[in-house]
Image (cartoon, rainbow, N blue to C red):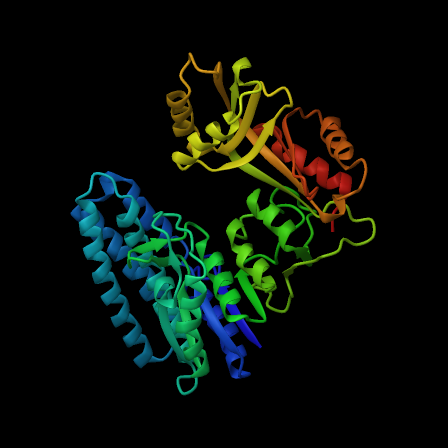
């Protein structure tokens, strides 16, 4: 059996977590199975590096020294717990010091900039996973120094080639597939376990790029698809995908099997356990993805495949909630019957890097309502007002910043009459007003926006009405 195993920051939270993850890999290696490991940063490290880039006041000589010392302590402590063999521990710490020295140079260079963005930011952020990979590979070798061999590669060294959209780069196919096979297959044939830093990639010019938060999920499925592995396992601190967020709905249940399309809908609307882009490579190659709990490795977790037929009577599979969003409504009688207005509105936001999660437009064509991430609201409004001045066909641009989006997902909804009516009746019975409604043509989901204060009430009402799982 050949596997890709991705370990997130919730697993690599400390030395004990690293050791637990290494033991999981070790058990499969001992059975002669081939494993590619994809690592994230140790919990909290990415946030510290991101904060340094974001806040000018932290980019002083003292700030750099404090950050480097904090990272040294974090990774030395993790190594002490995860690498019990002295000679390997000393080697690991030497490697960590070398990486921290390199990071120090990049931090110094970043400190000279008024704002740390683009290429400079990606270069700084890339060090988090380099450090965790050094600890993980040492922990794995320490389990069986005679048999377990590991090789650390950044995503770029492994073969992930991207465009140069720094901070959220997009992998280029088929270059990435070819590169991954060229670099990883020879290692696996030699019995070497590749330990790949998930966030980091490289452009065609060789510049360091990153895939954005959660990008290690995408790296894992890219590798799985390129190598044609049996499964990709995403190890986390939760059992798998749930019928709702257990923090919002205590009676939520584990989803044992779900389709790529359903899981992608959940990931796009608040299910943080999985990166929305990560399922596309697996879907194209037909590689199953499994979400498993590091704290309960005996559980099979959630299996994501091409088809997951709903059980008898199962209509809704999950209810998720997207918080911290805002809506923008573009209105104007002059928009009616004018070709390209919607494209112009969407293009205005795209040029400013604003992602749209939901669109609603009435047949009258008088208005278009868009739902975006709350943090993008200010630049979206500024861009629309620049591109559509008052004397244009757009009469007004308004917004709401106190909403949340509830997403109801399930393949059983397709062709089943009355689902929308049941959803909206459940919400109405709780006295919750719905502001925006959208449904995809696939009939896999119904999404609607409510006041932020009513979001939890709405999620619980729909979950109770359909009792998924």
The foreground one among 356 and 3 is 356
Image position, residue 453 (x, y; %): 58, 28
> Residue placed farthest to the top in the image?
391
Relative to 67, say whether 360 is above or below. above
The residue sitting at 49% across, 57% down in the picture is 217
Labels in figure, total: 0
Residue 357 position by quadrant: top right
- Relative to 157, say whether 185 is above or below: below
**Residue 111 shown left or right of residue 438 in the figure:** left
The quarter of the picture where residue 254 lies is: bottom right
In this rendering, position of residue 94 left or right of residue 229 = left
292 and 412: which one is in front?
Answer: 412
In the drawing, does residue 82 fall left or right of residue 294? Answer: left
Name the spot of residue 410 as percent of width and height, x first: 71, 46
The answer to whether 159 appears left or right of 469 in the picture is: left
**Image point (66%, 55%), residue name:** 259
Above or below residue 135? Residue 166 is: above
Q: Please tell me whether residue 461 is drawn above or below residue 431 in the rendered image.
A: below
Residue 294 visible, this angle: no
Q: Residue furthest bottom?
A: 146
In which quarter of the view is residue 367 placed?
top right
Question: Residue 177: horizontal and vertical position, in percent?
Answer: 45, 65
The answer to whether residue 109 shows anywhere in this view is yes
What residue is rendered at 66% in x and 46% in y? Answer: 250
> In the rendered view of the protein, which quadrant contains the N terminus?
bottom right
Q: Where does residue 111 sit, x and y in percent of width and height?
A: 19, 46
């Amino acid at each position: 059996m050949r596997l890709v195993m991705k370990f997130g920051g919730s697993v690599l939270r400390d030395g004990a977590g690293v050791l637990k993850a290494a033991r999981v890999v070790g058990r499969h290696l001992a059975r002669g199975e081939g494993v590619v490991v994809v690592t994230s940063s140790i919990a909290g490290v990415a946030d510290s590096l991101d904060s340094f880039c974001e806040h000018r006041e932290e980019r002083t000589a003292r700030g750099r020294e404090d950050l480097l010392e904090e990272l040294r302590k974090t990774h030395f402590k993790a190594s002490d717990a995860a690498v019990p063999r002295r000679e390997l521990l000393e080697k690991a710490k030497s490697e960590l010091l070398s990486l921290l020295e390199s990071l120090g140079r990049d931090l110094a260079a970043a400190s000279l900039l008024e704002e740390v963005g683009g290429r400079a930011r990606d270069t700084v952020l890339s060090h988090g996973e380099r450090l965790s990979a050094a600890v993980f590979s040492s922990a794995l070798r320490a389990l069986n120094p005679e048999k377990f061999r590991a090789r650390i590669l950044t995503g770029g060294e492994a073969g992930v080639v991207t465009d140069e959209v720094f901070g959220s780069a997009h992998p280029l196919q088929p270059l990435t597939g070819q590169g991954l096979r060229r670099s990883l297959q020879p290692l696996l044939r030699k019995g070497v376990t590749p330990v790949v830093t998930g966030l980091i990639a490289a452009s065609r010019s060789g510049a360091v790029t990153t895939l954005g938060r959660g990008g290690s999920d995408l790296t894992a499925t890219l590798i799985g698809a390129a190598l044609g592995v049996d499964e990709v396992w995403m190890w986390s601190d939760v059992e798998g995908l749930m019928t709702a967020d257990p923090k919002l709905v205590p009676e939520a249940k584990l989803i044992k099997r779900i389709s790529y399309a359903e899981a992608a809908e959940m990931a796009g609307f608040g299910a943080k356990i999985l990166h929305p882009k990560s399922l596309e490579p697996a879907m194209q190659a037909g590689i199953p993805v499994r979400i498993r709990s590091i704290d309960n490795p005996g559980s099979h977790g959630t299996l994501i495949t091409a088809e997951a037929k709903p059980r008898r009577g199962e209509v809704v599979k999950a209810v998720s909630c997207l918080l911290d969003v805002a809506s923008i409504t573009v209105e104007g009688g002059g928009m009616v019957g004018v070709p390209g207005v919607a494209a112009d509105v969407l293009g205005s936001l795209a040029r400013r890097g604003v992602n749209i999660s939901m669109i609603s437009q009435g047949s009258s064509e008088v208005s278009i309502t868009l739902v975006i991430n709350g943090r993008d609201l200010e630049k979206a409004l500024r861009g629309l007002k620049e591109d559509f001045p008052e004397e244009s066909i757009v009469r007004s641009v308004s917004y709401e910043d106190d909403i949340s989006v509830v997403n109801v997902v399930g393949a059983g909804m397709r062709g089943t009459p009355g689902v929308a009516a049941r959803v909206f009746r459940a919400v109405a019975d709780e006295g919750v007003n719905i502001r925006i409604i959208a449904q995809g043509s696939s009939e896999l989901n119904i999404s609607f926006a409510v006041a932020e204060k009513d979001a939890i009430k709405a999620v619980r009402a729909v979950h109770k009405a359909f009792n998924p799982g």
